[in-house]
Image: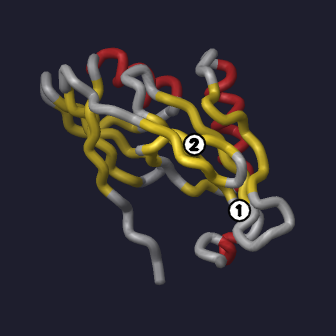
Amino acid sequence: MQAAPFHLAFPVHDLATARYFYGTVLGCEEGRSTDHWIDFSLFGNQIVTHLCADGGNSSKSDVDGHGVPIPHFGVVLSMDAFHTLAERVRAAGIRFELEPQTRFKGLAGEQATMFFKDPSGNALEFKAFTDMSQLFAT
């Protein structure tokens, strides 16, 4: 089955900062916008930053021995795109919540993963599989 693009809308505290982070740092193409929201293409998926004064709460969950930010969202990339994005984020001086690494090494679902936050505190995870058939492996 071919994957369909997802749509995700989430709060940000400043649209200009969101425009810079998603558009310049992450390289997302900008779509429609108003003075209250901006559409971006995140690797072909539609994300929408909405200007909100209160962004909500977050917590952490244990995954493979690491506390990962909850909630979070992201995209499964090719291994090359994963490494390119990691270097782009590092070059922009963005602090990783969880440095790029391999999770579940030698097990079903082995994957490269990294976490970082946007300027409004929204957690993002990007991951990659050497073998994409492992995406839903148990």
Q: Amino acid at mark 1?
A: Phe
Percent x, y for residue 125?
55, 44
Whether label 2 touches label 1, CB < 8 Å: no
Percent x, y for residue 57?
33, 33
Residue at 45%, 43% (x, y): give it: 70
Percent x, y for residue 69?
51, 39
In the image, which disc is placed on residue 88? none
In the image, which disc is placed on residue 68? 2
Mark toward the start of the polypeptide (2 vs 1): 2
Percent x, y for residue 39?
27, 39
Nearer the observer, 39 or 108: 108
**Which element carries disc 2, helix, strand or loop?**
strand
Residue at 69%, 38% (x, y): give it: 84
* Quadrant assignment for the C terminus: bottom right
Residue lying farthest to the bottom in this orientation:
1
Numbered label tally: 2
Looking at the image, residue 62 lies above or below residue 132: above
Local crowd size for mark 2, using a 10 Å CA cut-off: few (<14), some (14–19), many (≥20) = many
Rendered image quadrant of residue 135: bottom right
Local crowd size for mark 1, using a 10 Å CA cut-off: few (<14), some (14–19), many (≥20) = some
Rendered image quadrant of residue 95: top right
**Which element carries disc 1, helix, strand or loop?**
loop
The answer to whether residue 62 is seen in the rendering is yes
Residue matched to label 1: 129
Q: Nearer the viewer, mark 2 or mark 1?
A: 2
Q: Amino acid at mark 2?
A: Val
Nearer the observer, 81 or 10: 10
Left-right relation of 49 to 116:
left
